[in-house]
Image (tube, grey):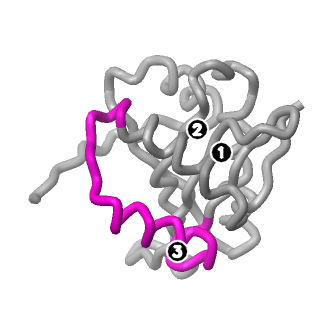
Amino acid sequence: MTKVRKIAASDEADWRRLWKAYLDFYEVELPEAHTAKLFQGLIKGEPFFAFVAEKEGAVIGFVHGLPHPSSWSDTGYCYLEDLYVDKDVRGSGAGRALINAVYEEAKSRGLSRVYWHTNEGNQTARKLYDKVATLSDFVQYRMD
């Protein structure tokens, strides 16, 4: 059985292990100072909130949500920025449980939408996303 709960300071080592795997999946490297600052923000709940998934006492996944105002909504939206489940336990329901935790948190804050992006080729994740949400017609553009 997967249990989802708010992230705690005691989760740092597990979160860092999973965060590294997540970044490796996307072939991204971030400075240690950024990772440390992010984790502290997750613990404080500002500006992100975060949950972890546990199975048999082991942390197996995380999710980060970012509430924000929207020009299209009086109540604001929630961007599900990061979601990762250990590859050895994918398909166990942990990903769905983490998404549901973000949805429930967003609802409790009165936010009218939860949305996220994924890599077009991330078929494993997209199978889940197609079951729990509606695919948007929007295309993302960037300026770095």
Kindly identify the residue that appears in the image at 74 percent across and 61 percent down: 6
Residue range in magenta is 24-49
Q: Is residue 68 above or below residue 34?
A: below
Residue 133 marker: 2
Q: Position of residue 144 (x, y in %)?
A: 10, 59
Instruction: Report x, y in % for residue 102.
Output: 66, 55
Amino acid at pointer 1: Ile
Nearest to the observer: residue 23 or residue 9:
9
- Amino acid type, label 3: Gly
- Estimate the spatial distance between the alpha carbons at disc 2 and disc 3, rounded to whole Å: 27 Å
Q: Which of marks 3 and 1 is in front?
A: 3
Taking the magenta stretch, the answer to whether it contains residue 39 is: yes
Residue 75 sits in quarter: bottom right
Going from N to C along the chain, the mark reached first, 2 or 1, is 1
Amino acid under disc 2: Ala
As helix, strand or loop, the secondary structure at mark 2 comes to: loop
Considering only vertical position in the picture, is 111 above or below 10? below
Q: Which mark is residue 41?
A: 3
Indicate whether residue 130 is drawn in magenta: no
Residue under circle 1?
A: 99
